[in-house]
Image (cartoon, grey):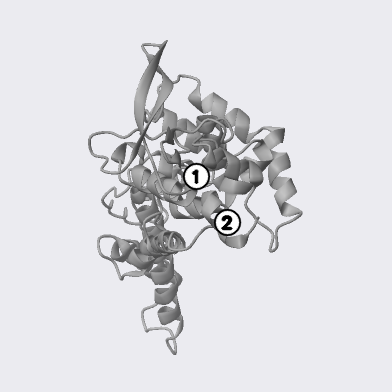
């Protein structure tokens, strides 16, 4: 026998499967594909294609366990069964399990995708709860404070005077907006403190908010009133950047009845614009979310993300949140 001759039958090469996510195991021996899929899932855990590929791999694992249990349930070995035939049977079962999970599969992957998707039942339930919360005064809004009999005198004076201001300090501002930021964060699957930081930059901690003749516009995110906006408007001087050059302009901004409705429109504004889809895929990573917003063109200021990130990391924000933890029941985080 030649030294180069095989010692036994050569195992067949498993067939390649369609590339569903661009990075996945194409057959059960494809360790490189599994490694690529793991890297893709870590880089973008909410990407729909990657999520489906991971769900299909999980379904293949479940089907493989089921098939192995069926093989183990037999009463004895067949007449012609050997260790080699058992090895080939196991290889066939694993490949069949992976093949069966592709396409429509058995439905296990579909259930996982619906459960884990940012637009699945969990996200829809959070959004529905958020919309329901708009039907009653939020404890973090001026209206809610009046209903509870705990309105801040400074905030009442600001509104009565026709000013757009809603707070006089970072601590007051965080106490005002955090409940609505938490609800909006749940609806968007975004760190609520990132929303507080963004609102703080846009409104100078609630001190500089566009105002109408009736008072504050409650517009904490600088959303302008374009031709599509059918609600009230508030004019305000603002700084815009064109080719890196700052220009002062007087622009119309959307006006809302409350802070809660301002946050609700912010949620709808982002979810209704495809350009912000990448930002909403960043999960609870607040800094990545803000950076993605800037890349999508949310603001013209080239330093916008750096400013919001600085507030997100600031001791003022942390001190304000820690102060609320000491007086809030149950704990806010």
| Tag count | 2
Residue 310: percent from the left, percent from the top? 61, 28
Asked if one can make out residue 3 in the rendered structure from this viewpoint, the answer is no
Residue lying at the far left of the rendered structure: 227
**Foreground: 3 or 251?**
251
Residue 14: percent from the left, percent from the top? 31, 55
**Foreground: 166 or 75?**
166
User: Which secondary structure, mark 2?
Assistant: helix
Q: Which residue is mark 1?
A: 42
- The residue that appears at 36% across and 67% down in the rendered structure is 111
Residue 292: percent from the left, percent from the top? 44, 33
Is 57 situated above or below 259? below
Residue lying at the far right of the rendered structure: 326
Is 140 situated above or below 133? above
Q: Which mark is residue 146?
A: 2
- The residue that appears at 42% across and 86% down in the rendered structure is 74
Looking at marks 2 and 1 on the same chain, the residue that comes earlier in the sequence is marked by 1
Residue lying at the far bottom of the rendered structure: 75
């Amino acid at each position: 026998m030649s030294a180069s001759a095989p010692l036994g039958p050569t195992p067949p090469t498993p067939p390649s499967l369609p590339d569903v996510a661009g990075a996945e195991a194409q057959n059960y021996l494809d360790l490189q594909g599994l490694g690529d899929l793991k890297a893709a899932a870590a880089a973008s855990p909410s990407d729909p294609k990657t999520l489906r590929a991971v769900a299909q791999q999980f379904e293949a694992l479940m089907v493989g366990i089921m098939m192995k249990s069926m093989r183990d349930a037999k009463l004895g070995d067949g007449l012609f069964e050997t260790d080699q035939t058992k090895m080939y049977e196991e290889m066939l079962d694993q490949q069949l399990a992976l093949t069966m999970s592709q396409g429509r599969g058995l439905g296990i992957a579909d259930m996982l995708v619906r459960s884990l998707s940012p637009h699945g039942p969990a996200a829809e339930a959070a959004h529905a709860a958020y919309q329901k919360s708009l039907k009653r005064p939020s404890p973090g809004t001026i209206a809610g404070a009046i209903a509870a009999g705990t309105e801040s005198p400074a905030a009442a004076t600001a509104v009565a005077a026709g000013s757009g201001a809603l707070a006089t300090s970072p601590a007051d501002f965080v106490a005002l907006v955090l409940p609505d930021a938490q609800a909006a964060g749940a609806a968007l699957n975004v760190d609520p403190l990132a929303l507080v930081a963004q609102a703080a930059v846009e409104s100078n901690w609630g001190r500089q908010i566009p105002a109408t003749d009736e008072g504050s516009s409650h517009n904490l995110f600088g959303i302008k009133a374009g031709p599509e906006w059918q609600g009230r408007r508030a004019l305000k001087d603002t700084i815009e950047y064109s080719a890196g050059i700052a220009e002062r302009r007087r622009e119309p901004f959307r006006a809302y009845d409350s802070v809660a409705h301002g946050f609700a429109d912010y949620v709808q504004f982002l979810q209704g614009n495809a350009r912000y889809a990448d930002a909403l895929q960043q999960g609870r990573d607040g800094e990545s979310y803000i950076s993605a917003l800037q890349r999508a063109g949310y603001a013209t200021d080239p330093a916008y993300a750096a400013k919001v990130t600085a507030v997100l990391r600031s001791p003022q924000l942390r001190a304000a949140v820690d102060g609320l933890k000491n007086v809030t029941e149950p704990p806010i985080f």
